[in-house]
Amino acid sequence: MSGHHRAVDALARRLSGYVCEPGSPDYVRVMEIDNGRTRTPPAYVVRANSVADVALTLAFARELELPMTVRGGGHSAAGYCLNRGGVVLDLGLMKAVALDRDTQRLRVQMGAIWSDVYGYVARHATPLIPIGGGCLTVGLPGFLQGGGYSFVSRSYGLGSDNVTEIKLVDAAGRLRTLTADAPDQADRDLFWACRGGGGGNFGVAVEMTLQLHTPAAATVMGGELSYPLERAQEVIAAYDAWAKDVPQAMAAYGYVGRDPDPADPTRKLPTFRITPVFNGEYADGVDLLQPMLRLQPFNVSIYSMPLPTWEATIGKSTLVGDRQAYIRSGVIGEDGWRSDMIEAVQDAMGNAPSPDSFVVWTHGRGKVLHPDGDNHGPYPHRDKRYVFELKAIWTDPADTRTNVEWAVDFGEALSADFQGAYVNYIDPLQKDWAVAYYGDNLARLRAIKAAADPTGFFRFQQSVDSTFEPDLSRPLDLSPINRTLV
């Protein structure tokens, strides 16, 4: 029996979870992340079912000198939760959730996805809400470690601002309890780093405690207002001026893509759409929308429903599934949407090689800009007005180069207007990515990383300590989008 086989058998005997090898149905399921373009095959998948399993898996990967990556919900924009030929530690069995009614805090294991959390809160903690993702199949660990915008972040801050404790297995296999006032300075540093410093960098988060909130009303007002893209100069400029001054209870996301024609749903129209979400009474939200309604959208839907129901209604629209995808991001500051930026979006979307590609942006500031307390993690883009995401989506792998080069050109056309990028939309072709993601906090993050993981065990192409830089000369080198490890 080879050394690898002996090590696998020894691991399997001690796990409360189990090992999956290529060909098994569970191995295939773990490989199915939300991007058909990235199906990077590891040698082993370990489905951990306890903290002890996590430590055993780290020791196993070290013994065999194999790289290891961690899969939470499987929504890594670049597929970095997988790797070729190494070990994938899958947390999907660890989904326990428990509520402390006195503190209104929720303790959640990190195999949970947002639908698990929303379902639990609806059953056990109504009317309280967590500050979570708008896509229900996203996992908690990556979302929260990268910052994490919610539809109500303008009311309550980022998801990471609402994390009060993290249980983390470090590179040495030790379980550490991270809080803002932990006795050990190193644990306080890690608590800071793990709330905006990006997933996969500092250890394996196995549990987090989330502060819940009582929303302003039993339901939110959620809606969609659609305008022809040919009116973008007029309507996006008006939206931008309106969104700058709305109360923080109102968030209004933007979208540019192709939407069904309400008169003929088989036909799709180039569309600019806003998605308003108001944390308050329905009628008050509708009143705030009046300036945008006066601009005569061609289609309007305005609903009153509990926030998790709205998240379930809207969240499916951004899923990639088995299609191919490549994601770019940028953050937009004080100047907002200037005329030349709107023109760049119109031009690029008019030339999109795939009708499935779209642009969406998150409405920032509000409580994101002014979080409670002074220990709110390293997320650097709190003062930015919007977080822009371009999702290039196509079906045929043969069309990859055409779509990726289009997306890179699109991003570069706006690069002078972007003031950084968002680590949760991690992009292997982002220039100067480490500064774009972490800004002035990069040096401190790298120091904390070196102290917590001195051998660089948690390493991938864009881990916080990586020196990788993409080459954007033409023909474009696509190899970075097809790998986890340099």
Image (cartoon, grey):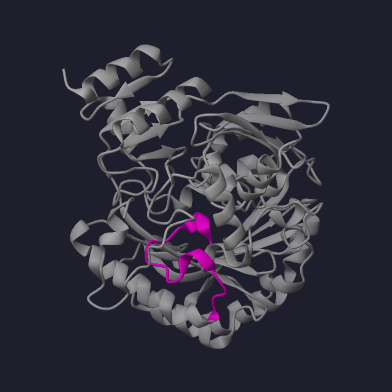
Depth check, front residue: 281 or 455: 455
x and y, in percent, of residue 472 in the image: 32, 75
- In the image, 53: left or right of 216? left
Magenta span of residues: 417-435
x and y, in percent, of residue 461 in the image: 37, 55
Picture quarter with the C terminus: bottom left
- Indicate whether 11 appears above or below 203: above
Q: Main secondary structure of the magenta part?
A: loop
Depth check, front residue: 378 or 372: 378
**Does residue 474 appear in the picture of this structure?**
yes
Query: Is residue 425 magenta-colored?
Result: yes
x and y, in percent, of residue 29 in the image: 32, 32
How many marks can you see? 0
Direction left: furthest residue: 1
- Indicate whether 95 appears above or below 214: above
Query: Is residue 295 magenta-colored?
Result: no
- Indicate whether 475 appears above or below 323: below
Depth check, front residue: 42 or 441: 441
Q: Residue at x 62, y 53 (%)?
A: 149
Picture quarter with the N terminus: top left
- In the image, 217: left or right of 86? right
x and y, in percent, of residue 118 in the image: 62, 34
- In the image, 139: left or right of 383? left
**Does residue 134 appear in the picture of this structure?**
no
Q: Residue at x 69, y 54 (%)?
A: 153
